[in-house]
Amino acid sequence: MGIPYQKLLHELNQSHIRYLIAGGFALNFHQINRSTIDLDIILHLEKENILAFHQVMSKLGYQLRQPIDIHDFTTEQNRQTWLIEKNMVMLSYYNSHNFMEIVDVFVSEPIPFIDIYPRRLEIKAFDMCIPVVGLDDLIEMKQIANRDKDQYDIKMLLGIKNGTHQ
């Protein structure tokens, strides 16, 4: 069976999808223990990349939670409208074969993808390379979100950055 999302990550890499792992999984990859079920992804929000991502998701049995047409998601104006008017921060997929597998895609790039991608952390595991949001960018994303749990995460991440995390 493998690790959760292993097949998905393999397929995303094989399909040359431009993405980064964020959220709780990113914290774990940066050595902060965080229990999490959903996989947060920052997707390069270009039309071809979005459609290719959706094709991989569909092929693996993932379905959209929101009742939208993926072609509508490829338009920046639609995404901004959903973000502002509906507070839709994430586009969510669930695995129809395993309802515990939930993938959330940022509706807006929290930091421009072309800036954040070169600073990624690459984790080599399970015969693949997993692209993860880099440490400084993860700290910045946590500062932007600024929830209580983000404040805790920032302290932990700064401890890693400064070499004081235990």
Image: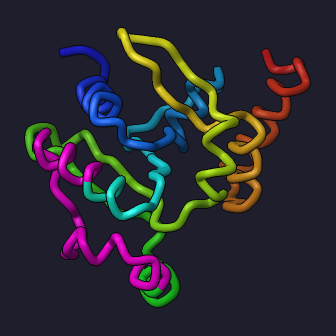
128 or 157: nearer the viewer: 128
Q: Residue at x 73, y 34 (%)?
A: 135
Q: Quadrant of the N terminus?
A: top left
Q: What x and y, as percent, mark residue 78?
A: 39, 83
Q: Residue furthest front?
A: 48
Q: Is residue 124 above or below residue 54?
A: above
Quarter of the figure with residue 154: top right
Quarter of the figure with residue 23: top right
Q: What x and y, as percent, mark residue 151?
A: 76, 50
27 or 59: nearer the viewer: 59
Task: Indicate how the structure is coloured in the image.
Answer: rainbow
Per the image, is 53 magenta?
yes
16 or 72: nearer the viewer: 16
61 or 47: nearer the viewer: 47
What range of the chain is rendered magenta?
52-80
Per the image, is 81 magenta?
no
Q: What x and y, as percent, mark residue 82?
A: 42, 82
Q: Is residue 71 above or below residue 13?
A: below
Q: Quadrant of the C terminus?
A: top right
Q: Residue at x 51, y 30 (%)?
A: 131
